[in-house]
Amino acid sequence: MHILDILGVGIIFVAVIYIGYYSTKKVDSSEDFLLAGRNLGKIQAGFSMAASDLGGSGLIGASAYCYSIGLSGAWWNWCATPAFIVLGIWLVSKLRPLAICTGPEFLEKRYNKESRVIASVMQICSVVAALSAQFLVGAVALNVLAGIPKSVGLAISVGLVILYTMGGGLIAVVNTDVFQFIILVGSVLVSVPLAMAKAGGLGAIKEALPPEFFSIGELGAWVPISWILMCFFMYSTQQAFLQRIFASKDVKTAKFAYVFAGATYGLYGLAVGLIGITMAVLIPGLEDSNTVFAMMVKTVLPPGIAGIVLGGIFAASMSTADSFLMAGTTLFINDIYKTFINKNASDTRVLWMSRAVTFVICVGGVVMASLMNNLINIIYLGGLFYSTSVFFPLVLGVFWKRANGKGALACILISLAVGLFAEFVLKGKATGFLGLPSNILAAIAGLVTIVVVSWVTKKPSKEKISFIE
């Protein structure tokens, strides 16, 4: 690496560490640590929401996919736009006024304790999977650009994230996310014209690649539909996103966060897609497509700028990793520790335990990152394991008074079973209806289950109904 690149990366690391350290001074209670005192403003909530989801899979995974199949791979990012905007307009105003901290807590107050326990455990597993993907991003970048072994890169990625997250909690995460969002989006926007110029411009790129690389329909209809549904499921159920709703100071701020993130994804998805297809011209035949963006940094960008953009890669991984890390911590503390292990714990004890759990979840993410390599598969399976199963119990629980605890619990279990069976048994073998994407089959099974079971069993009590009124 050029000395200017080392300097650029160093500046970003120092800035992140300083912002994180400064934020620790604002943590006086467990609510500060877990929910930023429920006082996030629009810039904090909006930039942090976007940064939480623009990370590893949206940058490294999507550029790799576009490198392999063309501009259609940009659907991985574009599918987030309708989900964020619709949910921001439709769901946020229902959830923000509720006196809850997590999705599983909603399930208990609306349905029963069993749903809360199952959902908590499932989502923590999902969080660890998502966290591992972000750690992998930083490790791959260091390996390609500096020759650092992936195991060492994982350690560096984890160390940087945990350094400020354990100290400042969600306040530190949000404040560093604002900075990381600016670096990440700026890095991508700067890289696009430089990479395309290196390839001879758009005309030369079109001549060098087959026409289908510029089509947005190569994936057919069902894959984008499946991804759009996945985004709806994730953004309405995953704690990393719900946490911004509950931490925002009011409904308008929470709505802004979702709509802003959705709008950002439109431009961001196109930029990342252009980088992917441009690199298919500049460096064809890469064995590991996950290295596409890092190779672009290494071969296209001038010294200094390359260092800043490398910092953008780390910003991508850190901004998502810290969000999922805080989500996992909040879930364990709120839905397991304070509910079942130590109901009368002092605030000081809860704060101490929150920091300890943050460390443990980090270790789980490192272990999984060392075992898996495909970023998009990691994210997809994580969403299939939790978000698809919980989507209808949460959404129908808000809008449909007849939904009851038996229906919700049955929905979670049936949806999970059908999704995993479709993904690992039917995929690539079944045709027709059974050949649909696994999360679509799981969602259909879950919807039918919760509607039928809720109708044929006892109505929920007035107490459960009054919770959403």
Image (cartoon, grey):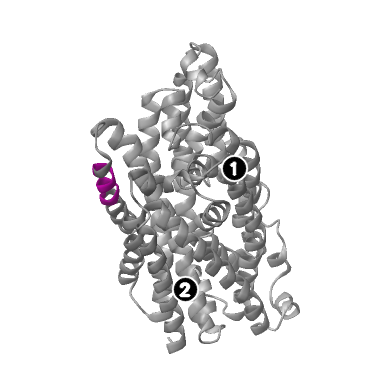
Q: Main secondary structure of the magenta part?
A: helix
Direction from residue 101 to residue 254 in the image, left or right: right
| SS under mark 2 | helix
Classify 10 Å Cα crowding around label 1: few (below 14), some (14-19), many (20 and above).
some
Nearest to N terminus: mark 2 or mark 1: 1
Is label 1 in a helix, a strand or a loop?
helix
Q: Quadrant of residue 211?
A: bottom right
Amino acid at circle 1: Leu
The quadrant in which residue 202 appears is bottom right
Outermost residue toward the bottom in this view: 3
Up-down relation of residue 72 to residue 451 (above or below): below
Which disc number belongs to residue 229?
Answer: 1
What is the magenta range?
A: 349-356
Spot occupied by residue 223 in the image (x, y as percentages of width and height): 61, 49
Q: Which residue is mark 2?
A: 311
Asked whether residue 324 appears in the rendered view, the answer is yes
Q: Is residue 352 magenta?
A: yes
